[in-house]
Image (tube, rainbow, N blue to C red):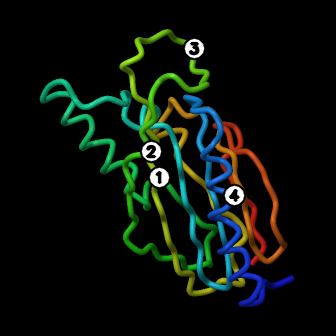
Amino acid sequence: MRLRPIALAAAALLLPSLVAAEAGKAHVHGAGRIDAAVEGGRIELTLTAPKHDLVGFERAPRDAAEQAHLVAARQAVLDHAALWRFNAGAGCVAETPVLLEGGTSAAGHDHDHGHDHDHGHQHADWTVRYRFQCASPEALRSIDTALFTVFPSLQTIDVQLIDGGGARALQLTSASVRLSVTP
C-alpha cells in the first residue's frame, strides 16, 4: 500500500501532535525517540534524545575539555553517513541534518535515570532532523542505525514509523538496530 499525498499530509499533521504528546512524558536517560516517515523516495527521521546520552552531561561545559566534548557530540549527531545505512540499491542521499538544542526543563519533574541530584540540575533533549532522498525508492527495504555504537549511553529508541505499509510503533536496541520499511 502506497501513501497518497493526502495520507502523507495527514501523517505530517499527526506527527507533531504525537511529538507534543511524547514531550509531556518523563525525561528518561538511555531512552530516545524517532519519528520516521517514508514516502516515495523521501525519508525523514527525527531523533529526540536526552542531551546527557549524546553529550555526557546536560549543563553548560565547565572547561575547555568539556567544550571540546560538546563540539564533538554535535559533529557526531550530525554525521548522517556514520549514523544511518540504507539497504544496497536504494541509492539514498542525505540532505544537511538540522540539530535543535534545547528542551530544557527543571529537575522538579518526574524522571528516572538512577541518580540523585540537586534541584539546580537541568534536563535537556536534543532533536535532530535527518532527510534523505532515494534514487530507487522501490528498492528501499531497511534502515540501519549506528546510534547505539556512537552513543553507547542510549539503551532504547522508541520509533513511530509511517511508510507504505501504514503506521506502526517499534523499539530499537543495540541488539535490534534495523527499521524494516515498506516503500
Which of marks 1 and 4 precedes in the sequence?
4
Q: Residue furthest bottom?
A: 5
Q: Are marks 1 and 2 in contact (CB under 8 Å)?
A: yes
Which of marks 2 and 1 precedes in the sequence?
2
Which of marks 4 and 3 precedes in the sequence?
4
* The label number, if any, that marks residue 103 in the structure image: 2
How far, Cα to Cα, is label 2 from label 3?
21 Å
Of badges 1 and 2, the one in the foreground is 2
How far, Cα to Cα, is label 1 from label 2?
9 Å
Q: Position of residue 31 (x, y in %)?
A: 61, 35
How far, Cα to Cα, is label 1 from label 3?
23 Å
Determine the residue positioned at 51% across, 22% down: 108
* The label number, if any, that marks residue 127 in the structure image: 1
Q: Residue furthest left?
A: 64
Location of the C terminus (image quadrant): bottom right
**Is disc 2 placed on a helix, strand or loop?**
strand
- Label count reads 4
Location of the N terminus (image quadrant): bottom right
* The label number, if any, that marks residue 26 in the structure image: none
Q: Position of residue 113 (x, y in %)?
A: 57, 20
